[in-house]
Amino acid sequence: MVTTQRRGPLHQNHLLSHLSPTLLLHPPVGRTVRPREEPSEVERSLLEALQNQPPPPPRPQVRRSMEHFLLGLAPSLERLPLDKQEFIKFKLMKMIFDHSTVVLNLDHVDPQ
């Protein structure tokens, strides 16, 4: 008794019909990788970074008029020689101190 093997597209499709359509379209290539039970350290770090909300953007600084005035003086002051800069800073601090209402008591107090 001689058996003949049927070859051709019809016979091959019949043999593969029990497989899922996904396997037919995308057969496995190479070795199959088993999923890990726990994520690696790198994966945990990435997951944590992705889950953390980014910090809110910094609020824009609102400057008072006095700050604007004093910051506007800085470039002109920096162009002067160092000795002149120090003299002007000293004079400004002295004028503010002379006109302030704060009274400092600098008398030496003996501890009891």
Image (cartoon, rainbow, N blue to C red):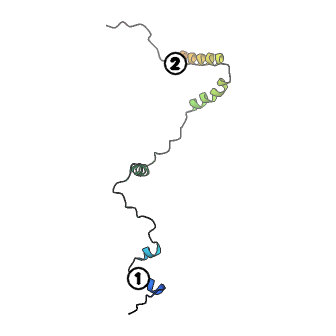
Q: Earlier in the sequence, mark 1 or mark 2?
A: 1
Q: Quadrant of residue 27?
A: bottom left
At 56% from the left edge and 18% from the top edge, which residue is drawn? 93
Q: Quadrant of the N terminus?
A: bottom left
Q: Which residue is mark 1?
A: 15
Task: Check the image and report above or below for 23 versus 96.
Answer: below
Marks 1/2: CA distance? 100 Å
Residue at image mark 2: 100
In the rendering, at what x and y percent does residue 82 appear? 65, 18
Residue 6 placed where, x, y %?
Answer: 44, 88
The residue at 52%/18% (across/down) is 100
Q: Is residue 6 above or below residue 87?
A: below
Q: Give how far across and how far down residue 91 sits, in percent.
A: 60, 16
x 63%, y 19%: residue: 85
The amino acid marked with disc number 1 is Leu
Element under label 1? helix
Q: Secondary structure at mark 2?
A: loop
Instruction: Say which quadrant the C terminus sits in.
Output: top left
Image quadrant assignment for residue 94: top right
Q: Quadrant of residue 70?
A: top right
- The residue lying toward the viewer, choosing from 107 and 80, is 80
Q: Amino acid at mark 2?
A: Ser
User: Which circle marks residue 72 in the picture?
Assistant: none
> Which of the two residues, 38 or 17, is positioned nearer the viewer here?
17
Q: Percent x, y for residue 106?
A: 44, 10
Q: How many marks?
A: 2
Say which of 67 and 15 sits in front: 15
Residue most extreme to the bottom: 1
